[in-house]
Image (cartoon, rainbow, N blue to C red):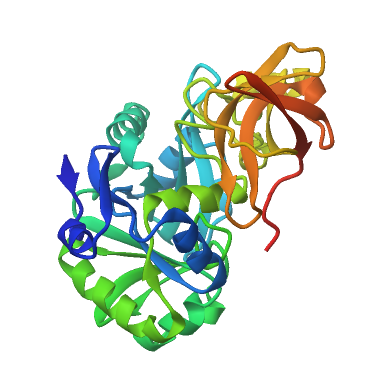
């Protein structure tokens, strides 16, 4: 079990620690609902240092990224980030990731913790153009400072105007007394804020100053359980639940990051799938009665037939109702469609809704 550079600090703060993607991670501090509401209403800080970081450099860096990812990274300029995925040869997804353009020949790929080795090997196997690849995952830490008060709470820690860093852009600047930190307006909560990339040797100082600067704004440390409820209220996919090696990006509603204006791994087959039409689709649903949908539960049609399964589900703290994501047949995927979730012996009525669940 690996530790992040902050694991001892989390334990000292009373965090409940759990194994996650090979790391010892804080799942909660004071409880998922309280932590969830802190992020929705003020500001919270997550340690997500288990995520992986790859540096891709050289004159052929963009060519490699264009080959292995579905989105069009050629549209990026310095200081822009992009959500994308790594398609496999079989119509599924190796991983989803964020691409940062640092310079024309210097790019950062941020991947999911559980897929670091898999992604590295996959990208390496397609590196026929000999781009320079460096795996920085063991050397860098990542903090997510999320919530509507994040800009105001963190402004004293940097000389750049945080309000000018728009969604999916970033600055390399000073932060919490450290030079050359990536301050990125990305995040997985739907409540705004930043992600801070720094070296492991620097992150304790950054963590301490973030908590001090945010004290007057009610900042609290937040665990992975609230991260999951926050992302689910936004309808954001989680790798291993809602997308995996068997799910097509088109089925998962990720057509918007699948650009057929360029050639990439398995592009021809995905283009054929788009033209032929998908047979199943990832949808969001809300329960109409009390209950909590869980991953793996059957989704049942009005005739009593199984039409799919739940991939993520929870009791949404902001909505006070059961919500979930799941794959259903195309015919049953339109918003407003009545469905049922098989919760133990009961078929609980639900309705397909347009995402996100949480409108803010």
Residue 133 figure quarter = top left
Residue at 48% x, 47% y: name it. Answer: 228
Residue 267 figure quarter = top right
Locate residue 120 relative to residue 218 in the image: left or right. left
Question: Residue placed farthest to the right in the image?
Answer: 336
Pick the residue in front: 27 or 34. 34
**Quadrant containing the N terminus in the rendered view:** top left
Pick the residue in front: 34 or 180. 34
Locate residue 360 relative to residue 277 in the image: left or right. left
The location of residue 338, given as percent across then percent down, is: 82, 29
Q: Is residue 225 above or below residue 339?
A: below
Count of all numbered marks drawn on residues in the image: 0
Pick the residue in front: 19 or 166. 19
The location of residue 81, given as percent across then percent down, is: 50, 57
The location of residue 327, given as percent across then percent down, is: 65, 25
Residue at 27% x, 33% y: name it. Answer: 117
Would residue 103 be visible to someone looking at this image?
no
Q: Is residue 2 above or below residue 81?
A: above
Residue at 29% x, 73% y: name it. Answer: 180
**Quadrant containing the C terminus in the rendered view:** bottom right
Locate residue 282 relative to residue 352 in the image: left or right. left
The location of residue 325, given as percent across then percent down, is: 62, 35
């Amino acid at each position: 079990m690996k530790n992040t550079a902050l694991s001892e600090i989390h334990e000292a703060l009373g965090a409940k620690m759990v194994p996650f993607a090979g790391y010892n991670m804080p799942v909660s501090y004071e409880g998922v609902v309280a932590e969830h509401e802190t992020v929705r209403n003020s500001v919270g800080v997550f340690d997500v240092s288990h995520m992986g970081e790859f540096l891709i450099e050289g004159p052929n860096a963009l060519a490699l990224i264009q080959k292995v990812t579905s989105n069009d990274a050629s549209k990026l300029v310095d200081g822009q980030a992009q959500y994308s995925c790594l398609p496999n040869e079989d119509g599924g997804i190796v991983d989803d990731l964020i691409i940062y353009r640092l310079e024309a020949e210097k790019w950062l790929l941020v991947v999911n913790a559980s897929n670091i080795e898999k992604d590295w090997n996959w990208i390496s196997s397609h590196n026929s153009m000999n781009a320079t690849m460096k795996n920085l995952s063991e050397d860098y830490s990542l903090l997510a400072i999320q919530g509507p008060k994040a800009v105001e709470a963190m402004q004293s820690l940097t000389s750049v105007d945080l309000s000018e860093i728009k969604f999916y852009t970033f600055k390399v600047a000073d932060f919490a007394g450290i030079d050359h930190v990536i301050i990125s307006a990305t995040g997985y909560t739907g409540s705004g804020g930043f992600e801070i990339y720094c070296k492991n040797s620097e992150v304790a100082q950054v963590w301490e100053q973030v908590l001090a600067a945010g004290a007057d704004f009610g900042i609290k440390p937040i665990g992975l359980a609230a991260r999951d409820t926050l992302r689910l209220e936004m309808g954001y996919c989680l790798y291993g639940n809602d997308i995996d090696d068997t799910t097509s990006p088109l089925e998962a509603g990720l057509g918007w990051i699948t650009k057929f204006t360029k050639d990439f791994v398995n592009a021809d087959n995905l283009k054929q799938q788009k033209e032929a039409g998908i047979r199943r689709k990832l949808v969001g649903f809300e329960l109409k009665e009390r209950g909590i949908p869980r991953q793996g539960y059957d989704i049942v049609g009005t005739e009593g037939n199984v039409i799919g399964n739940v991939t993520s589900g929870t009791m949404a703290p902001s909505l006070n109702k059961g919500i979930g994501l799941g794959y259903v047949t195309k015919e049953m995927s339109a918003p407003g469609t009545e469905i049922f979730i098989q919760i133990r012996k009961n078929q609980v009525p639900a309705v397909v809704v347009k995402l996100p669940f949480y409108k803010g």
